[in-house]
Image (spheres, helix red, strand yellow):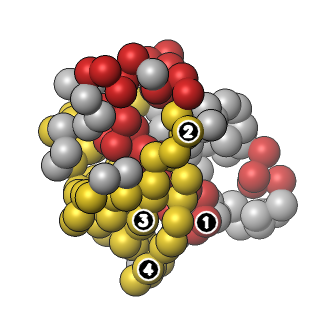
Amino acid sequence: MTLNVTEIQKILPHRYPFLLIDRVDDIKVEESIEAYKNVSISENIFQGHFPGHPIYPGVMIVEGMAQAGGILAFKSLSEEDQKNADNKVVYFMSIDKCKFRSPVTPGDKLEYKISVIKHRGNIWVFKGEAYVDGKLVTQAELKAMIVDK
């Protein structure tokens, strides 16, 4: 299953400049998701991070992984719960074992690979990895919960 940005916006409440997923390439319900973001020099974040040496902030990479995990969690809901998705939101609960291995710069295609470690009730634990050109640049364990708005 693939999702374009319009379909992603039906799931996530995030909007410019904080929607950090451009496309979903694959979803395996309750298992994994692959998505990406094209990093562009035109993004406002590069005005201050860092002038003359643009580096995409690690916290933005982790947020992108969390957004991908949120899409996976919503797409894994029952059909009945998906119909009520407008009344639900995913809250980020924790980040563990986070490592930044290589800088991400304008022009990179940031590929997110998220898999479910554990799911119980409305709590999800994900293994998140981000790649550029097949090279692991960031990894973390993320915990989230789906709640009523």
CA separation in Å, label 1 and label 3: 15 Å
Instruction: Relative to 144, say whether 39 is above or below.
Output: above
The reply to whether callout 3 and callout 4 are in contact (CB within 8 Å) is yes
Q: Which residue in the structure is indicated by mark 3?
A: 143
Name the residue rendered at 31%, 21% in the picture: 80
Helix, strand or loop status at disc 3: strand
Type of the residue with mark 1: Val
Mark 1 or mark 4: which is in front?
Answer: 4
Give the mark nearest the N terminus, 2 or 3: 3
Give the mark nearest the N terminus, 2 or 4: 4
Type of the residue with mark 2: Asp
Disc marking residue 148: 2
Name the residue rendered at 36%, 24% in the picture: 82
Give the mark nearest the N terminus, 1 or 3: 1
Helix, strand or loop status at disc 2: strand
Quarter where residue 124 is shown: bottom left
Give the mark nearest the N terminus, 2 or 1: 1
Residue 33, position in %: x, y? 26, 44
Instruction: Please tell me which residue lies in front, 81 or 17.
Output: 81
Disc marking residue 59: 1
Q: Which residue in the structure is indicated by mark 4?
A: 96
Figure quadrant of the N terminus: top left
